[in-house]
Image (cartoon, rainbow, N blue to C red):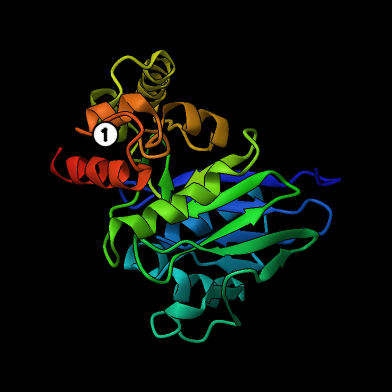
């Protein structure tokens, strides 16, 4: 683990986007993961008394980048964006691809290309800190909608998360937890751990909270899209136990689209 664990704050932006700030206490460097809404990000910075030095963009969709110009004007933060999103995020200080590293003070992240939701999507994995910023690839109890690829592409991206330590904290780009939970219960109705997590999410929602971050261990136990290799999910998807997980995932994602 990092000698000085990062400080991380989450907050709602727009209607259901999740804003995230990660700060290195040793240096004071601080990054926003995307800027869905300038006002919310600036308010969170003011509340914490933090100075923004960086913006790490996960993908080009407007609800993740539209607040960037105002925040850069106010803070001077440098922007790091996916190389494949150059046209949508002009003027970034750096464009990154698979295997690149980015730093926020003394914190270091590896860049994963995780296409499926869109072609330019990347994930930032701070291995020493035990956190991963998954954007719209992996959600608590769910995954992103497939928009610019075949479902198998998103499945391959999701399988990368399965190799992370169970304790890794997962920060996603939206609070879709309750709707994801309803689908997860339909697809995996006998999963006791899932029932407990949905109940927890409902309790949090009553006071304006949300089940983000999650952990890789919790998602492996309860997220139907990460459990496509499990016999129970194959049966729910209309396949035989032992079916190709990519095919099961495809069936589950199609079902979720209609749910």
> In the rendering, at what x and y percent does residue 96 appear?
58, 76
Figure check: 238 above or below 48: above
Q: Is residue 150 visible?
A: yes
Would residue 135 be visible to someone looking at this image? no
Residue 206 in picture, x, y percent from top left: 35, 22
SS at badge 1: helix
Residue sitting at 37 percent across and 56 percent down?
A: 154
Residue 191 pos. (x, y %): 37, 17
Q: Which of 150 and 128 is in front in this view?
A: 150
166 displayed left or right of 240: right
236 up-or-down from 191: above or below: below
Q: Nearer the viewer, residue 120 or 198?
A: 120
At horizontal 37% and vertical 42% (from top left) the residue drawn is 245
Q: Residue at x 37, y 70 (%)?
A: 119
On-image quarter of the C terminus: top left
Horizontal placement of 77 versus 211: left or right? right
**Residue 223 place in picture, x, y as percent:** 40, 33
Seen at 39% across and 24% down, the residue is 201
The residue lying furthest to the left in this view is 258
Q: Name the residue under label 1.
A: 179
Is residue 75 placed above or below 258 in the rendered structure? below
Q: Is 83 on the left or on the right of 46, as rendered?
A: left
């Amino acid at each position: 683990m990092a000698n000085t664990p990062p400080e991380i704050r989450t907050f709602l932006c727009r209607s259901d986007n999740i804003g995230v700030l990660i700060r290195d206490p040793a240096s004071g460097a601080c990054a926003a993961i995307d800027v869905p809404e300038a006002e919310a990000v600036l308010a969170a910075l003011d509340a914490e008394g933090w100075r923004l030095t960086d913006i790490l963009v996960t993908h080009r969709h407007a609800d993740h980048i539209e607040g960037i110009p105002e925040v850069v004007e106010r803070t001077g933060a440098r922007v790091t964006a996916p190389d494949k999103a150059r046209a949508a995020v002009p003027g970034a200080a750096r464009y990154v691809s698979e295997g690149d590293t980015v730093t926020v003070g003394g914190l270091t992240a590896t860049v994963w290309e995780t296409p499926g939701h869109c072609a330019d999507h990347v994930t930032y994995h701070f291995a020493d800190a035990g956190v991963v910023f998954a954007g719209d690839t992996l959600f608590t109890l769910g995954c992103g909608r497939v928009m610019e690829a075949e479902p198998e592409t998103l499945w391959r991206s999701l399988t990368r998360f399965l190799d992370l330590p169970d304790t890794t904290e997962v920060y996603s780009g939206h609070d879709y937890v309750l709707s994801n939970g309803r689908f997860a219960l339909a697809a995996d109705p006998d999963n006791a751990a899932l029932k407990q997590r949905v109940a927890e999410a409902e309790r949090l929602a009553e006071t304006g909270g949300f089940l983000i971050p999650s952990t890789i261990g919790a998602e492996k136990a309860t997220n139907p899209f990460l459990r496509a290799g499990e016999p129970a999910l194959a049966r729910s998807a209309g396949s035989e136990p032992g079916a190709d997980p990519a095919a099961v995932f495809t069936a589950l994602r199609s079902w979720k689209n209609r749910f």
